[in-house]
Amino acid sequence: MDTGLDSSPYRAPDGAIEERPATRAKPFFLAPPTLKLVVMMVFTLGWYAVWWFYRAWRAVRQHDRRQFNPAWRSIFALFYAYACFRAINRIAADGTREKRAPAGLLAIAYVVLALTVLLPGPLWLLSPLSVLPLLPMNARARRYNQFIDATVYRDEDGFNAWNWLGIVVGGACWAILLLGLLIYFLSTLVPAA
């Protein structure tokens, strides 16, 4: 007697069930660990900030479904830092109930520290400190990524080949700059003949 249960779509499958690897979600914001952000900002002479702002603006554009060019906003980050920090605060507030970071103060600090590169003499060496205002915003974005998906794929946590290239080239630039400063200071100690 055929009951029709053998062809029922509700019947348990025969044999072993094929396991598929879980797909890993990508983080919403670029939010590398603090150590990586500091290393990349220092060794790339601040150029990593352009990439960080670009990825932040791209996430904001995706979230808000607005049309603007994130590349221009990242290149002119000195003018758009406040808007970017404010947008990160707004988006992160959607999912978390933590206190907002002071976007205005952080933007002012970022602009002032980034512009120290224009100072005369060795005072331009203060410019790597421009990473400091990015740290609270990066931490906020990182917590938001964790809130969205606790198992978020962190491909940005490690150093990839491009990061190492930036570190090597930037390290060579730093070595040349510091050697030049050392030679300059040593030459001022020697009396002129």
Image (cartoon, grey):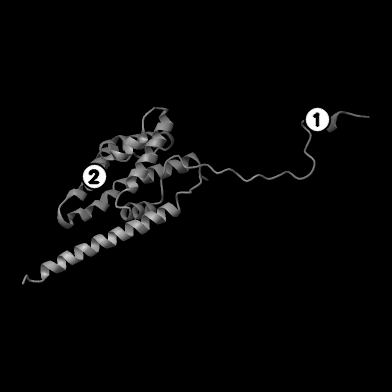
- Pointer 2: what residue? 109
Residue type pointed to by label 1: Ser
Q: Position of residue 42 (x, y in %)?
A: 31, 54
| Quadrant of the image containing the N terminus | top right
Q: Earlier in the sequence, mark 1 or mark 2?
A: 1
Helix, strand or loop status at disc 1: loop
| Quadrant of the image containing the C terminus | bottom left
Measure the C-alpha gap from mark 1 to mark 2: 67 Å
Number of marks present in the image shown? 2
Query: Is residue 77 placed above or below 162 in the rendered structure?
Result: above
Which residue is painted at 39% across and 34% down in the image?
Answer: 60
Residue type pointed to by label 2: Ala
Q: Is residue 135 visible?
A: no
Residue that extends furthest to the right in the rendered view of this protein: 1
Q: Position of residue 158 (x, y in %)?
A: 45, 54
- Near mark 1 (Cα within 10 A), the count class, few <14, some 14-19 or many ≥20, is few
Q: Is residue 127 left or right of residue 62?
A: left
Which residue is painted at 17% across and 55% down in the image?
Answer: 123
- Near mark 2 (Cα within 10 A), the count class, few <14, some 14-19 or many ≥20, is some
